[in-house]
Image (spheres, coloured by chain):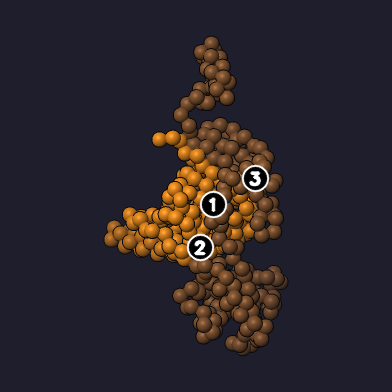
Chain colours: A brown, B orange
Amino acid sequence: MKPLRTGAAVACAAALAGCAIASQALAPRKPETLVVVVPSRVDGHVGAVVVNTPGGQQVLDAAYASARVPQGRTPQVATLGPEEVERSFAAARRAAPPPPVTFTVHFVLGTNQLTAQSKETLKSVMAEMGRRAAADIHVIGHTDQLGPESYNDALSLRRAERVRDHMVAHGFARELITTLGRGEREPLVDSGLSNPENRRVEIIVR
Amino acid sequence: MRARVATLAILAFFAQAAAAADIGRIKTLEGAVTVVRGEARLPATAGMPLQQSDRIVTGRDGAAGITFNDNSMLSLGPETTLDISRFSFGASGQPDALDATLHAGTLSAVSGKIVTRSPEAMRIHTPTTILGVRGTEFLVKVTAPAR
């Protein structure tokens, strides 16, 4: 490496006009970004990241595709080895939280009662809580797409609160539960109608 | 004039109320980790709720993992400084967004519902680039200039 740099410096002295690259290599270190796309630990899926610089865009969409982005220069794209990536990012990856798990419960039609299956689901929720450190729960109510949006917003929150109360009565810590109502905005089935599948409450354990 | 002052006061109130909402929690913790919130420097604890504009700083032996309300996850390695510049998810009349700024250190990231619904609404800013996230899992490292 060293002889190369010396060579570059000599070339620089010989032709001052063309020494931008060499002078950057010798200058004090400037900030540099390294980004690597990795397969999902959950299902192996490989996503994509767009690297935006003043000079343009670069899309990374393959496993271990990386870009090194020095300040004010074009990103250098390369595919890295998994071991090399693991070495550089071991601590950050070890600190990754366990992925949230979502459970869904339903009411018996036209009642405030959870279905028998949903009561079983709550046992799984409790078990999942026990497996996690610093767990908390989001309880999110949803409605079908019939009726005014404001009505459905209120209804979905009531559904979430009902599930929360049921959970608290069965030993869940109230302060770890956040209730939210999403109304009809996140249908499972986008039918635009009264669809019982959309009348549900999601329980997300984080 | 008085009306304008009142309006400003109301806006300031709402801005504060919006900023104070929990956006996620610290789930994993190792070594020394500090949450900088305005003037306050708070020692991070497992389960600690985070707010928009929080800065997370890890020490030489520190690491921390955050799960956001949309299921996005960011975890920090040692000697890392990360600002959660903006987080908005499912708020009516406001586009979903997660903007985080990595000033130095290492970051492991998994996208959540924000990206599922609007690709590139999650952005990681660094001193040399802005990363638009279209999906799932990636790693970022910022080497800061020698001081």
Residue at the (47%, 26%) spot, across then down: A27
Amino acid identity at mark 3: Glu
Measured as percent of width and height from the top left, residue A55 is found at: 58, 34
The answer to whether residue A139 is seen in the rendering is yes
Which residue is denoted by mark 2 in the rendering?
B27
Look at the image and tell me in which quarter the N terminus of chain A lies.
Answer: top right
Is B115 drawn above or below residue A65 in the view shown? below
Which residue is denoted by mark 3 in the rendering?
A83
Depth check: give the residue in front, B83 or B139: B139
Measured as percent of width and height from the top left, residue B135 is found at: 64, 53
Amino acid identity at mark 1: Ala
Q: Tag 3, which secondary structure?
A: helix
Look at the image and tell me in which quarter the C terminus of chain A lies.
Answer: bottom right
Among numbered discs 3 and 1, the one appearing first in the sequence: 3
Amino acid identity at mark 2: Lys
Chain letter behind tag 1: A
Residue at the (44%, 58%) spot, across then down: B52
Q: How far apart, in angstroms, are the residues tagged by discs 3 and 2?
A: 26 Å
Chain letter behind tag 3: A
Question: Residue A92 — which label?
Answer: 1
Is B77 drawn above or below residue A150 in the view shown? above
Residue at the (54%, 18%) spot, across then down: A6
